[in-house]
Amino acid sequence: MRKLPVRSFVVKVVALILTTHCSFLFAADSIPLIDGVWRVGEVRINANSTATSHYLPNDPRLVGRLFDFKTSAISNDMPEAQPCAQPSLQPTNISLANTIEQSVAGYGFPSQPAEASDFGFDRDKAQSSPTYLVQCRLAPWHAELGTSAIRGVWLAKIDSASVAMRWYDETLLILKKIAMNDTPKPSFSCRAARNTTEKTICASYELSEFDKSVSAAYALFIKQAKETGQSQKDISADQMRWMKSRNACGSNKICLIESMRSRLEAIVSNTEI
């Protein structure tokens, strides 16, 4: 075998080290790959689990909430909101299918590991989708989630406009990217906005999403009342009382978010959505 000159050998080794190091840095510091604001479009839970969950499929408390990914921080308006400073993505080096099996709680007795198909994913596609741990200052984000092997929030890019993210109560969130030119679209016509609160909601994407969530939860509450013979009049009157209270917030965004979040909790606690 022909031996390489020492200098040539050293150059090749250094080049290999630099290439590997740079690749690792790109993978571990890849927040720009998902830079922007993303909306929770779906909430998925294990379809085969019989355990009682705090969150429900497409739970209105979570659908419509926003995640803002920046190189400096990740912010969100989830019920478990916890900012993430100096975020980075660390490759798990395993697929979405394997990440679900290793980090999400199983079901049944004896316990069966969760599978990608339990959450509505095609298993073959899930085997080819890599996952990334979300870290904040190099520590796991929401470290109380998952197992010792895969702890904290992780995500997998489904396509250019969709990301799957592990969240609380063994849920998987499907995030949809919001385009730069997207405008707020609440449950009512902004052309007919009558008061300061409605105009404030129409001017905010976040508030308009909360408004749609409350509207969706209320519609399901009414639907359930029809099916069970519950008084729809009482539910409608309660909603009107709440709207009057909400409108007292005026243009105060924090007050409006707190009011709508509380209303969501109140409705969901009285329904079987």
Image (spheres, helix red, strand yellow):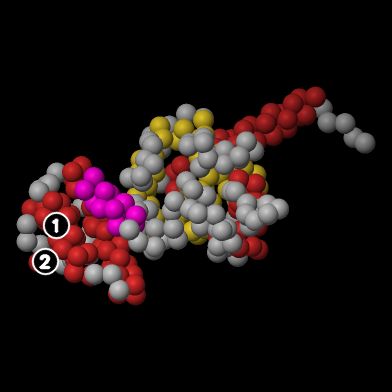
Secondary structure state at the residue bearing disc 2: helix
Label ID, residue 241:
1
Residue furthest toward the top?
6
Is residue 198 something that shows in the picture? yes
Occupied quadrant, residue 124: bottom right
- Is there a contact, CB below 8 Å, between mark 2 and mark 1? no
- Residue density around tag 1, few if under 14, some if 14–19, many if 20 or more, within 10 Å: few
Label ID, residue 194:
none
Residue 89 against residue 246 in the figure, above or below: above
Which amino acid type is shown beneath numbered disc 1? Arg
Occupied quadrant, residue 203: bottom left
Majority secondary structure in the magenta region = helix
Q: Residue at x 21, y 48 (%)?
A: 259
The percent position of residue 75, horizontal first and vertical second, equals: 35, 40
The percent position of residue 199, horizontal first and vertical second, equals: 11, 56
Q: Could you tell whether 176 is left or right of 100 in the image?
A: left
Secondary structure state at the residue bearing disc 1: helix
Occupied quadrant, residue 81: top left
The percent position of residue 39, horizontal first and vertical second, equals: 37, 54
Q: Residue at x 18, y 69 (%)?
A: 233
Which amino acid type is shown beneath numbered disc 2? Arg
Q: Residue at x 23, y 45 (%)?
A: 258
Q: Could you tell whether 204 is left or right of 78 in the image?
A: left
Which marked residue is nearer to the observer: mark 2 or mark 1?
Answer: 1
Is residue 205 something that shows in the picture? no
Q: Could you tell whether 92 is left or right of 82 in the image?
A: right
Find disc 2 in the rendering and name its residue.
191
Q: CA distance from mark 2 to mark 1?
A: 24 Å
Is 5 within the magenta? Answer: no
Magenta segment: 258-269
- Residue density around tag 2, few if under 14, some if 14–19, many if 20 or more, within 10 Å: few
Q: In the depicted view, which residue is nearer to us: 75 or 270? A: 270
